[in-house]
Image (tube, rainbow, N blue to C red):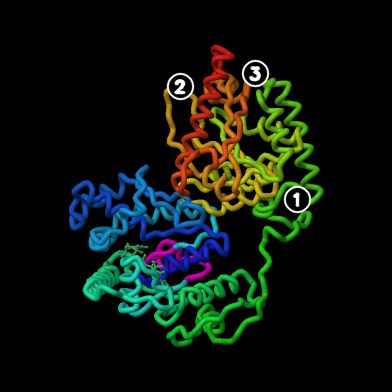
Amino acid sequence: MIVAIDGPAGSGKSTVARALAAREGLTYLDTGAMYRAVTLACLERGVDPADADAVAEVAKAVRVSFAPGDGGAAPRVLLDIQDVTEAIRTAEVDRAVSAVSAVPAVREAMVAQQRRIAEGHDVVAEGRDIGTVVFPKAEVKVFLSADPEARAWRRAIEREGGDPTAPDAKVHDKKAYKRVLADIKSRDAQDSARDTSPLKPADDAVRLDSTKLTKDETLDAIAALVDQRRGRSGESRSSTVGRSGESQSSNPGQKALSEASGGKKGKTAKRPKKADEPMRAFHCDFDDYFDHGIDQWPLPSRAWHNFMCGVVYGFTKLYWPWVFEGGEEFMEELARRDKGTVIVQNHVSMVEPVITVVWGWRHGVHIRPVYKKEFEKNDLLTWVFSRTGAIPVNRGTADLKMARRCQRAIQRGESVLIYPEGTRIREDDKKAPIHGGFALIAQMARTDVTPMAVIGVRAVTPDNKLPARPHHVWFKVGRPISFGELGVKGRRQQLDAMEQRAMDRVWRLRAQLRAEHPGEW
Ligand SMILES: Nc1ncnc2c1ncn2[C@@H]1O[C@H](COP(=O)(O)OP(=O)(O)OP(=O)(O)O)[C@@H](O)[C@H]1O
Ligand SMILES: Nc1ccn([C@@H]2O[C@H](COP(=O)(O)O)[C@@H](O)[C@H]2O)c(=O)n1
């Protein structure tokens, strides 16, 4: 499902989209942040935002992506590998961004990146042209507006460090408020008047004016549309919304919104979460397998899983005789506790995740590898991945859905297997940037990170081509690292320290294995 939320600055798009994403398990896409990141790149490179050709070159050269924020906070914005989350929110970027975003080549580059990010995902995307251009077939389209004064008031309070959603919120600096109001009006005018993808409601968008609505009321109104679209219209939400200030229309979504915002108190019915519902044999989709514990799968699926793991276990033991040094202690430790761990390994081939999964299976431990969604080239492959207990990740986005699935798996006692190098590293001197999402997952699940290293696998496919050759494979299992032992305070600092410590351990374990088995890689 795609939920598109468009509207002018300060109307509440990001606030509502983030909350909706968390509530509905959707991937959140802040497209404004992408245009801001390109604008920052221009400013940093001394490119004049009015020079369309030079701006277009910058847009084509940079890659904007997202990484999960700390413990459910807003996603971090990455410009190539630089974290620009805070740097893109300055008044200087505010003033230049509309000129940059009006350049057609910039829009082309960003829209392509946005569609790529959303591929295969349930997404809530917010911006100016989501319902009209980026996702014209979005299942839910909302055009969220508010009076310019209300929007400037919110932004001014926010800039003073206050919370505009608090009941006693006040603007202290009236001059600053006037400057913000002028900036907002100028941005509205530029964004609405440009030739390419101007800010305007899609014909089939539901219009919602948040001037007199609270944040929760706005969220409830949009969530009601999502419910209606998902066929959950019989259920009512616990809170009600006030007047939207918009007239009724014949648009069915608008009607649903009017009903939702009509002031009638709904029953306090808790919508069952999909992951809590038992699975029914032969009535499950891929998501069911990703969302549920392997022990919760229907009997035929568990039987198939056991059969496959048994066959693969036997085959790998014979063809790639493998050992896990320190593996028995690790399994004993896992057996003593009720939570799983986040396993991180170096990545050389496709052999190590397979062996690690069946090694866990042999010990009665479910190890769920996280795999790139790009591998899902067709339904058959997705079927295979889903039945092995693997969990997909949409790389290049703040894939909170994956993070939450992993968190729940760990809390159920399963462990997750992550390759922070992201790609297979087959040369000694090749260094890949580390994807730190594993530390965040461990933090969300309040568990530890277990480093492991593997060698011997490069000789299985020496030219990175099939057929795979028989060869010995060695794993070394490190001691789980807890956040408490890092000796640092603060969520962000702990994440950084964990990423560094865990990967250093992986590489140290690999060096030890290589010393023990000279010539092996
Ligand atoms: N209904 C509301 N009532 C009061 N304040 C709100 C409401 N919705 C959002 N806010 C507050 O207004 C500010 C602006 O909201 P937000 O950043 O979500 O707007 P936006 O439309 O995403 O703006 P932009 O396009 O500039 O990113 C935030 O501080 C938010 O907490
Ligand atoms: N889909 C979009 C989103 C944003 N823009 C431009 O970026 C500016 C900043 O957006 P915020 O949501 O962060 O305020 C905005 O003023 C637009 O110029 C866009 O063109 N299309």
Name the residue that disc number 2 marks. 428
Res. 86 in view: yes
Q: Residue at x 71, y 45 (%)?
A: 338
Per the image, is 136 magenta? yes
Query: Are the residues tagged 1 and 3 within 8 Å (C-beta)?
Result: no
| Segment colored magenta | 126-141
Q: Is residue 44 left or right of residue 287?
A: left
Q: Separation of disc 2 and disc 1 at Cα?
A: 41 Å
Mark 1: secondary structure: loop
Q: Is mark 3 within 8 Å of ligand 2?
A: no
Mark 3: secondary structure: loop
Foreground pick, 521 / 192: 521
Q: Separation of disc 1 and disc 3 at Cα?
A: 34 Å
Given the image, on which type of amino acid does mark 3 rest? His
Which one is earlier in the sequence, the residue at label 1 or at label 3? 1
* Total residue callouts: 3
Name the residue that disc number 1 marks. 297
Name the residue that disc number 3 marks. 472
Q: Is mark 1 within 8 Å of ligand 1?
A: no
Per the image, is 165 magenta? no
Which one is earlier in the sequence, the residue at label 2 or at label 3? 2
Q: Is residue 481 left or right of residue 128?
A: right
Provide residue 236's location: percent of width, then percent of height: 63, 78
Which one is earlier in the sequence, the residue at label 2 or at label 1? 1
Q: Residue at x 71, y 33 (%)?
A: 331
